[in-house]
Amino acid sequence: MSAVLEVLSCGPSMTVQDMGRPGFLAQGMTRGGAADVLALFEGAALLGQSPDLAALEMVGMGGSFRATADVRIALTGAPMTATLDGVPLAWNASHLLPAGATLNIGGIRTGTYGYLHVGGGFDTAVMMGARGAHLSAGLGAALAAGDTLPVGNDVGDTVGMVLPIDDRFGGGTIRITPSMQTDQFDSATQERFTSTAFRRDARANRMGVRMDHDGAPFEAAGQLTIVSDVIVSGDIQITGDGAPFVLMCECQTTGGYPRIGTVLPCDMARVAQAPTGAPISFQFIPFDEARQIEQRATTARDALKSAITPLLRDPATIKDLLSYQLISGVTSATSDPFEQET
């Protein structure tokens, strides 16, 4: 019998998410999908399955869950407190959720978006080629207490694995390339933009993240006459009040605000995960260098499975056991440890 995950309680804006649905930009819908795509790859590596499978995206806090059958789970993304029947669980790790046990996921420790994966993925309805909710397009809905989520067929059996926790949860430097209207910002404005210490504003969601800063607003030449054209996630619009706004996975498809740059796809998770008030700065990268950075990020993402280690190591499986210092100090085979020196 297939397992079902019961939602006993949950925080706001918790949704089922996957890689999203490309190919609908002309129809007015952006790709959507997980705000932190890397977290999907981490969960897939921990459970030995495809990153295309759907997971739960939790914003700021998690909830309480119970499964009707044994289910393998993985916890990735922004670290949150987590317990299984009161016993603490490691984050960025895989575990067994026994039937009838209660999984509690509490508040965020750092970052914004946490993810709960299950072996086999969530087998919810497919809408326009994907299972993920796209709330701004009216596809799917936020979860609520009492909801039940069917779990797909799990072909794996490994649990108790862990990945190192990434450092993308505290803001930092965001790499960008020139965008459609970059040349309409004079060189002094572009230089001020890259030298400004921004802060992630509280006004942020899956559509966009506003950047707060001290000093004069940013503006482009002729910005009031810009004709609306196609925009994509990662574009940085300078809105009417002169503040940068990084467009996220559920952004609109057209817009008329000037765009000073576009965030590299591999840095979008850092933008999404930055908590309110986190420091943010922007750095222009040439297109050729940006392409190389993306290629390295893809290689590292595909190699995540090689970085997995057991939460508890079995000496029988440690190939270099003799290289470990299993005891400290020096012992003697002839001396009597109970003999007192005189």
Image: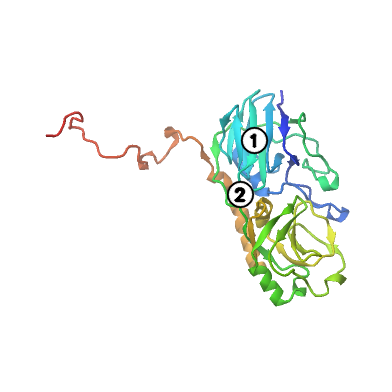
* Residue 224 place in picture, x, y as percent: 86, 70
Label 2, label 1: how many angstroms apart (C-alpha)? Answer: 28 Å
Q: Which residue type carries mark 1? A: Ile
> Under tag 1, what secondary structure?
strand
Q: Residue at x 83, y 48 (%)?
A: 136
Residue 179 shows in this picture: yes
Horizontal placement of 177 versus 87: left or right?
right
Image quadrant holding the C terminus, namely top left
Residue that badge 2 annotates: 302
Colour mapping used in the image: rainbow
Horizontal placement of 251 versus 312: left or right?
right
Residue that badge 1 annotates: 105
Q: Which residue type carries mark 2? A: Asp
* Residue 188 place in picture, x, y as percent: 69, 76
* Residue 85 place in picture, x, y as percent: 60, 26
Residue 214: quarter of image: bottom right
> Under tag 2, what secondary structure?
helix
Check the image and report above or below for 129 versus 247: above
Between residue 128 and residue 281, name the one nearer to us. Answer: 281
